[in-house]
């Protein structure tokens, strides 16, 4: 899993069920929207966030991408370092106005989406997996990172999920005091084994 690149899970989905080269070329030439557009948009968002997270390596952080869960879903990014462990859920909404509440988010004032609740569930899943194999309690915080949005607003009561735009995710870098360097390496050693996640 340490070799997974940002968007690894989406790349696999695109390779398996996505358009052929001819289909992509045709849609591009005709400027037609396709059912695959959201996949490619999401892939670009995960790559952008992945690049931001990789920049934290000199500060003692480790990062994994596209962690497949036993239920068929995935965790976009798992950040492990001196400031703790973060399960990061990436959402790309180009030019949108986003509001995030305790469990739901609204994009351009539309229907509520369970982004914050999903982020909490991913963190709980990661906490259970890592806690099973580490010899100390591993706390995992949920983080929701929005890519390409025009504005981002958080509800005053939103304290359970960290919410960022992709350029703000570097704010995690200076965090410290949660894990020793030895604990960082132990958590990372567990987290990079696919079997640990698929047995959960």
Image (cartoon, helix red, strand yellow):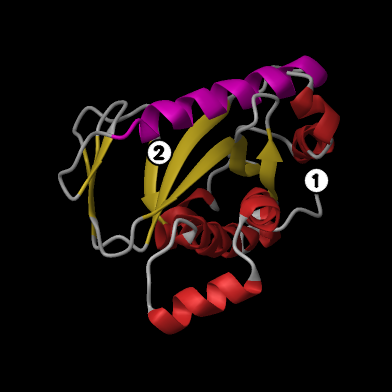
Disc ID at residue 162:
2
Side of 37 where 190 appears, left or right? right
Check the picture and name the quadrant holding the C terminus: top right
Q: Are the residues at dot 2 and dot 1 in contact (C-beta closer than 8 Å)?
A: no
Magenta stretch contains residue 133: yes
**Mark closer to the observer (2, 1):** 1
The residue under the point 32% across, 29% down is 159
Residue 169 percent coordinates (x, y): 46, 54
In this rendering, the answer to whether 105 lies above or below 56 is: above
N-terminal label among 2 and 1:
1
Q: Is residue 66 left or right of residue 119?
A: right
CA distance separating discs 2 and 1: 25 Å
Q: What stretch is highlighted in magenta?
A: 113-135
Q: Between 104 and 134, which is closer to the camera in this rendering?
A: 104
As for residue 88 lying within the magenta part, the answer is no
Q: Where is residue 156 in the image (x, y as percent from the top left)?
A: 19, 33
Magenta stretch: dominant secondary structure: helix
Residue picked out by circle 1: 1
Residue 154: image location, x then y, percent: 23, 41
x and y, in percent, of residue 55 in the image: 62, 64
Image-based side of 1 in relation to 168, left or right: right
């Amino acid at each position: 899993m340490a070799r997974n690149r940002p968007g690894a899970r989406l790349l696999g989905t695109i390779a398996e069920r996505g358009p052929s080269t001819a289909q992509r070329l045709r849609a591009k030439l005709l400027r037609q929207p396709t059912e695959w557009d959201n996949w490619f948009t999401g892939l670009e968002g995960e790559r952008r966030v992945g690049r931001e997270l990789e920049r934290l390596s000199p500060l003692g952080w480790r990062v994994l991408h596209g962690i497949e869960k036993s239920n068929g879903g995935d965790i976009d990014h798992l950040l492990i370092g001196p400031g703790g462990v973060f399960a990061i859920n990436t959402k790309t909404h180009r030019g949108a106005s986003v509001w995030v509440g305790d469990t739901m988010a609204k994009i351009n004032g539309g229907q509520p989406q369970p982004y914050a609740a999903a982020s909490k569930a991913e963190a709980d899943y990661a906490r259970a997996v890592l806690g099973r194999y580490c010899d100390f309690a591993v706390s995992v915080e949920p983080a929701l990172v929005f890519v390409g949005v025009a504005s981002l607003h958080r509800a005053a009561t939103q304290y359970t999920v960290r919410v960022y735009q992709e350029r703000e995710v570097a704010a995690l870098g200076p965090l410290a005091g949660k894990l020793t360097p030895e604990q960082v390496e132990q958590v990372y050693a567990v987290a990079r084994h696919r079997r640990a996640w698929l047995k959960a």
